[in-house]
Image: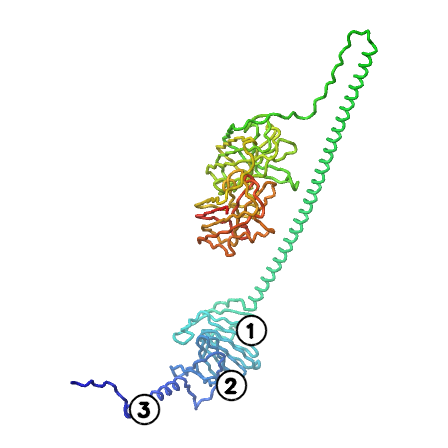
Amino acid sequence: MMKKRSTTYRLNKVDYSIFIICSIAAAAMFFLFYRDLNSFTIKQTEEPIAKIYFKRNTAQRKFLDSDVWEVLANSSNVYDGDRIRTSTDSEAYTEFSDTQIQIQLNEKSMIQIFKSKDKKDVNFIGGEIRVANKSGSDDSLTIHSGNKDISILGSSEAKLSLPDISDAAAAGEEEAGDSAVVVEVVSGRVEVKNQDDKKNSDTESVLVKAGEALKFGSGRSAPEKIATVQEIEAELAAQKEAEERAAQEEAKRLLELEEAAKKEAEELAAKAEAARKEAEQLAKKKAAQRKAAQQAATKKRAQQAAAKKKAAEENAAKKKSESTVTTVAKEKPTVQAEPKGPKLPTEVAASGVEKTLTRKSINLLHHDFIDEKTKAQKYNYEYYFCIAELTDKFKIIPKGSILQLEINGTANRNIAYLAIQIGTGEEPWQRAHAFTRTSPNDGAGVIKDVPFTIKKNILIDKDIVNTDTAYMGIAYDPEVLDEPVNMSDFKISVNLVSPSATSDTKEAKKGLTKTFEYKSVLLRPNTTDYILPIAADSIFGENASIPKGKKIRVTVSGTSDTPIKFMFAKLIDNKNDDWDVVWLRNNDYSALGFSQNPIPANKAFSYKHTYKLSRPVTNTYYSMFELVVPKDQVPSAPTFTDLKITIELL
């Protein structure tokens, strides 16, 4: 039987000794490498001419007779002919030993320093430097750049840059060649001269003064003046001041316009108030005239009755006293005067008979009118028909009747919704029903050059006293569209339903559900909102009511092409022309929103909200459902795709 061999190896003392000796040797070599890497040379046989100090990171130095760059320590000596360079994110400056001349090197810059007994020179090779000569006027520094000699005179400070030199040339990795130099004098004076003109002392040099900045080309061309930082800042400050002054003037102009508009509004309000008072006085005057006429007619009838009675008494007395007379002439009857004013019909228009009126083309044109409530002058766009053309001539249409309308045509403009207005035939003009708006295509509206059909029932709640003087208008407000519209192939059909057939309203059935779907629909503007209106009778049925306290759930889903901050639904009862939102409480529209979160653009959404009626819907003929997006909650009118609206009576 074979025994299992152990494979475990244990170090002996010799192994430990070898490991320790190797580790010490490696550490020593690393130390010597680091020391060599960060060492710099000190010349024992030569006097330094300057020192270098670091403002950020470090700098490198290369001797005149060497090709090796070495890293310097802060406050290192600089010798005659040394090249100094800075790398990225590094800044340093040098100071000459016996003068107050300082040269600051920005990042990626290089210079070479020379000094003789009576002269200090610097070769500017690349980047950007700032030279400050704080010594007396006799001590100067000459900087050589290309073929230019730049003398920094005493008590002067200047910035020099070589904008056309590459980073490789500035680092000494390639020849820089001749290049343009920019000289910007901060204080004092700087003299610039071509090196080719040294032998000719009569050659004129260029003197750059404080606040000036010149760009000297590589040739002998004239220097180009460039803007300094101070000049740019001054120009920006002047521009800002001009903009602020213009803004102040614009604000002043807008304020003046606002004041003028306010004054004009006050004047219009005053005129409207004066017109209202005048209308009231005229109404009072007419009422007084009617009362006086009634009193005169009553007095006249009383006088006629008294005269008739007196004549009868005298005739009876005469008959009694003249017994010999065999015959007595009969008294001629008094003829009553017919009442003044137009004759009114007494017969009711026939019901159950449909009549159709066609027009090849109609134009809805600008129409001025006086608002019934505010008495202010307004306008809309309207086309109207005489009711006698649509029913019977010289007839009455009693209160409680229903006009069943069907309107067809093709419009040359988009119209969000149309208003239908029918007058009573009296003067002044009165509407015979609640204000009625209708929008075909389930609220999408009339679409340009697309035939439309409108079916609408109008419940008459005031007697139409004369079909010959009553008119029906089809109109739209300027908030919907402020230009005329032409409708071609126009046709309107009317069927009159008598009051006996309408009876009382019936309560809408609980559990009723209605869904409307739109492949693509653009919400139309009114004064403050973008809306999608749907007639309430197409949801809850005709001639229906909904009691206070009932709940209605509205579900909306689809995709909007623009972000929407807030969206809600309204159910409006307009029996008294007051556009009453039946589920609004304390005028708080924020409580009607589908969601507190905004609807993102081009992303599918689905929201639902249950509304409780705080007021009843008296009759669906007067009512309208609207999907509403306030104008201040969207950048533009939203277009919905795959929109689905479901309305449930709970």
Q: Is residue 16 above or below residue 167?
A: below
- Return the residue nearer the eye: 130 or 294: 294
Q: Earlier in the sequence, mark 2 or mark 1?
A: 2
| Amino acid found under the numbered disc labelled 3 | Ile
| Res 333 → quadrant | top right
Secondary structure, mark 2, is loop
Q: Position of residue 637 (x, y in %)?
A: 51, 49
Please tell me whether mark 1 or mark 3 is closer to you in this view: 3
Q: Is residue 339 left or right of residue 355?
A: right
| Res 109 → quadrant | bottom left
Q: Is residue 153 left or right of residue 291?
A: left
- Mark 1 and mark 3: span between their CA atoms? 63 Å
Query: Mark 3 = which residue?
Result: 21
| Amino acid found under the numbered disc labelled 2 | Ser
- Mark 2 and mark 1: span between their CA atoms? 24 Å
Q: Do the numbered discs 1 and 3 sit on residues whose CB atoms are within 8 Å? A: no
- Return the residue nearer the eye: 612 or 564: 612
| Res 476 → quadrant | top right
The quadrant of the picture occupied by the N terminus is bottom left
Please tell me whether mark 3 or mark 2 is closer to you in this view: 3
Query: Mark 1 = which residue?
Result: 186
The outermost residue toward the right is 321
Q: Is residue 16 above or below residue 386?
A: below
Q: Position of residue 26 (x, y in %)?
A: 34, 87
Query: Mark 2 = which residue?
Result: 97
